[in-house]
Image: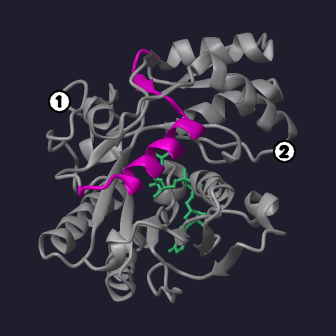
């Protein structure tokens, strides 16, 4: 694991950098003085997300596919390239699976060639519909390997396996972040995830779609907290022995979230209950004690503080195509 031990990090590649999380990460890295390359196929990301960076001399966008990466020599690589919302990743499941498995393998290979430290954006979905609550990194999950979510869940699990094989064989200095639901400005109103759906529907004055009875829970992390966690994990001087959960451990039912959105938007409509999607997890809350211990990281932004800028973003972003499913 050669040059990843270099103390001064000058250049960073962010794969998936035109997406929701990736664009915030690129902005933060440029603001810290890094030279940043963003590799993105624009599959779900949009170039408008990078508008604040277009005049930055230290920033460069490279349109390309992570499965066939051609990358400049860099000190660090963040791999965020993958569709992330159920609506998007189920639209082309083969693309999702090959991006996660083939893309991760190719990018790890590239990291080895240039001697870069590597961080993988994994997901709480590796825990599936969890039998253990809250979810600790040691929990191996309960994933349906043949269901409609498998392209993503199993793709991310295989990607984690690849990361730890490269690490065990001392080929690359690897870190794996298991990201829990994150929200904030630049989410796409058509991506079908619960925060986007509720805000977009409330702003359009439509009934708010609630899957099931709405008592299922999620925890919601504000984007700035998540980016801070990713950066601390990448900068951590030792290689962590396991993946690290990053998320907000405050747990809310979907009905509680809807109530907050209703209050903020001043919505006066009604709820429309629909069946739960297949394999939808009942409960989801990270145990973040490992991140707290290793990285001294814990979220700072409450749902009450994070929702207003998110609603403001949706008010001013282009009109959305209604989304139909997924949480
Ligand atoms: P996003 O869809 O906004 O961003 C993903 C980006 O990857 C997009 O810009 C897309 O164009 C790009 N991409 C997709 N396939 C690619 C390919 N083959 N080659 C190059 N680029 C490709 O999603 P996001 O919410 O920003 O998520 C970013 C990462 O974080 C994903 O890997 C996702 O699985 C992970 N994650 C996100 C969340 C969350 O709540 N947002 C939760 C868990 C994990």
Against 154, residue 318 (above or below) is above
**What is the tally of numbered marks visible in this picture?**
2
Q: Quick one: quadrant of the N terminus?
A: bottom left
Quadrant of residue 44 within the rendered picture: bottom right
Identify the residue position indicated by label 2 in the image.
319
Query: Which stretch appears magenta?
Result: 213-239
Against 284, residue 320 (above or below) is below
Decide: few, some or many residues near mark 2? Use Cα within 10 Å; few <14, some 14-19, many ≥20. few
Is 267 left, or right, of 182 in this rendering?
right
How many angstroms separate mark 2 from mark 1 (CA)?
39 Å
Please tell me which residue is depicted at 27% across the width and 42% down the height of the picture.
128
x%, y% of residue 2? 28, 80
Please tell me which residue is depicted at 34% across the width and 72% down the height of the picture.
4
Identify the residue position indicated by label 1 in the image.
131
Label 2 or label 1, whichever comes before in sequence order: 1
Q: Nearer the viewer, residue 295 or 306?
A: 295
């Amino acid at each position: 694991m050669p040059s990843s031990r270099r103390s001064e990090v000058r250049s960073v590649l962010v794969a998936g950098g035109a997406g929701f999380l990736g664009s915030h990460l690129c902005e933060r890295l440029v603001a810290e003085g890094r030279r940043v390359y963003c590799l993105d196929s624009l599959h779900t990301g949009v170039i408008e997300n990078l508008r604040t960076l277009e005049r930055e001399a230290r920033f460069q966008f490279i349109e390309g596919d992570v499965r066939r990466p051609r990358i400049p020599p860099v000190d660090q690589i963040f791999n965020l390239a993958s569709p992330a919302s159920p609506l998007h990743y189920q639209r082309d499941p083969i693309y999702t699976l090959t991006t996660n498995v083939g893309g991760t393998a190719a990018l790890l290979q590239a990291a080895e060639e240039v001697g870069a430290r590597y961080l993988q954006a994994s997901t709480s979905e590796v825990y599936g519909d969890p039998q253990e609550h809250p979810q600790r990194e040691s929990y191996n999950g309960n994933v349906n390997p043949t269901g409609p979510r498998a392209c993503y869940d199993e793709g991310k699990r295989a990607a984690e396996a690849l990361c730890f094989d490269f690490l065990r064989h001392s080929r690359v200095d690897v870190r794996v972040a298991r990201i829990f639901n994150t929200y904030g400005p630049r989410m796409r109103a058509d991506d079908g995830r619960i925060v986007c759906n509720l805000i977009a529907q409330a702003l359009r004055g439509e009934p708010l779609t609630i899957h099931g009875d709405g008592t299922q829970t999620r925890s919601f992390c504000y984007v700035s907290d998540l980016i801070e966690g990713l950066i601390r994990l990448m900068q951590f001087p030792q290689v962590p022995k396991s993946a690290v959960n990053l998320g907000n451990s405050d747990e809310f039912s979907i009905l509680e979230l809807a109530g907050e959105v209703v209050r903020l938007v001043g919505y006066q409509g009604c709820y429309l209950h629909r069946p739960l999607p297949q394999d939808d997890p009942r409960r989801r809350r990270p145990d973040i004690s490992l991140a707290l211990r290793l990285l001294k990281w814990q979220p700072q932004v409450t749902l009450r503080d994070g929702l207003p800028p998110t609603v403001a973003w949706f008010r001013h972003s282009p009109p959305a195509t209604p989304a139909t499913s997924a949480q």
